[in-house]
Amino acid sequence: MKRLLRVSLLCVFVSGCGGIQSPLAPAGDQAAALHGLLLLMVAVCGVIYLLVLGGLAWSLWRRRPAAAGDNEPSDAALGRGLGVTAGVIVAGLTVLIVGSFLADRALFATRAQPAMEVRVTGHQWWWRIEYRDAAGRWIETANELHLPLGRTTRVLLGSADVIHSFWVPNVAGKIDMIPGRRNLLDLTPRRAGWYRGQCAEFCGAQHAHMALDVKVEDATTFDSWLAEQGRPAAAPAGPRAAQGAAVFAGPCGICHAVRGTPAAGRAGPDLTHLASRRSIAAGTLPMSRGGLQGWIAQPQALKPGTSMPAVPLRPADADALSSYLTTLR
Ligand code: HEC
Ligand SMILES: [Cu+2]
């Protein structure tokens, strides 16, 4: 029983050391710079901690029961002890100052270079994402950030309502998204794969359901992905999807855009290529037909307080609607 407890505690600790949402498994230049600084801080503070504990243990061990006054350290010994302590602290702090200066330079090393711009805007509780393509057009999507491997992407961060915070720990450090301000963050990922970001500033009841799927992919895959995202939605294939599109254009188009159709709402995420995404409503549900059906039927049960209302629909219309949404690839 005791061993089981120990093993499971160990698992809990070790599970924090890697994975898709961890600053301890850097997958980009900026995260690597911060990871190096973290290791340096742990090393310097660890050495000082051990020295202090070692000194304490040594002086306790030397203390013998003796006549009063016999045990007092001499002025010279005290002076030597203080000198060593001050020396260690000054040396440790100097190493940390140099280390953080170098890490800071590494974080801003790309700032002077041109880079692809992506606007990410925080909303309660989802992410609006707009890419600037080579032709200077802004291409809108939501809740899933794609990054080209080995290139630098400049993220322009803002907020539409309250303060949010952008943090994809495997790729870079955290920066707040403040209404009325644009903060910049350069991302240079070096390892392909899926990562997870999370709003890192409490922003209301559904703050915990404000996750961000991040995919780092090789530059050619990224380029064709972006070209695909820039296209308008395909015309609905078949009568069922056409019925769904007609339903969508009514109540849903007030808040959502599907480019290439009359739906041009701006209050909610752009749904032009919804079905190409991995999850629904900022990581709340995995993407599937059933997930979409559930979300549309009961957004307030799945994400209480979200600005998306449950729209009353006839069952046949709801069914056609989710068929249509799955064609938005
Ligand atoms: C009053 C505005 C409003 C209306 C009307 C509305 N929505 Fe939404 N919708 C939103 C908002 C805001 C979100 C983001 C919610 C969140 O994640 O917290 C959203 C999210 C979604 C998502 C998830 C998008 C993503 O990127 O994961 C889908 C799918 C969706 N809505 C479909 C619909 C459909 C279908 C209708 C019509 C039946 C509809 N919505 C009506 C505002 C609206
Ligand atoms: Cu938030």
Image (tube, rainbow, N blue to C red):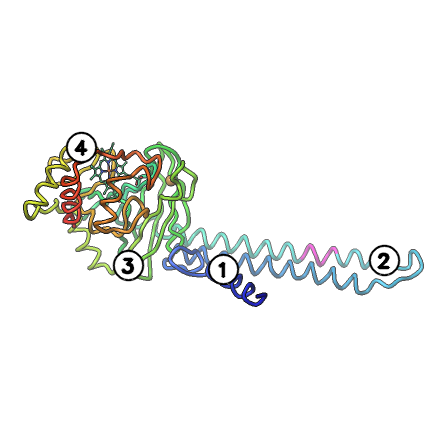
Look at 73% across and 61% down and name the residue there: 55
Q: Distance between the residues labelled 3 and 4?
A: 39 Å
Location of residue 145 in the rendering, given as x and y in whole percent from the top left corner: 28, 50
> What residue sits right under mark 2 in the picture?
74
Labels 2, 1: front one: 1
* Residue identifier under label 3: 149
Q: Name the residue under label 4.
A: 251
Q: Quadrant of ligand 2?
A: top left
Q: Do the residues labelled 4 and 2 touch (CB within 8 Å)?
A: no
In the image, which is nearer the foreground, mark 1 or mark 3? 1
Residue 24's x, y, as percent? 45, 59
Q: In the image, residue 190 lies at what x, y percent? A: 33, 61
Identify the image quadrant of residue 25: bottom left
Q: Is residue 200 left or right of residue 295?
A: right
Q: For the residue labelled by badge 4, is the local secondary structure a helix, a strand or a loop?
A: loop
Against 314, residue 237 (above or below) is below
Tell me where the magenta segment starts and ends, as one range.
Answer: 82-87
Mark 1 or mark 2, which is nearer the start of the sequence? 1
The CA distance from mark 2 to mark 1 is: 49 Å
| Amino acid type at image mark 1 | Val
**Amino acid tagged 3:** Leu
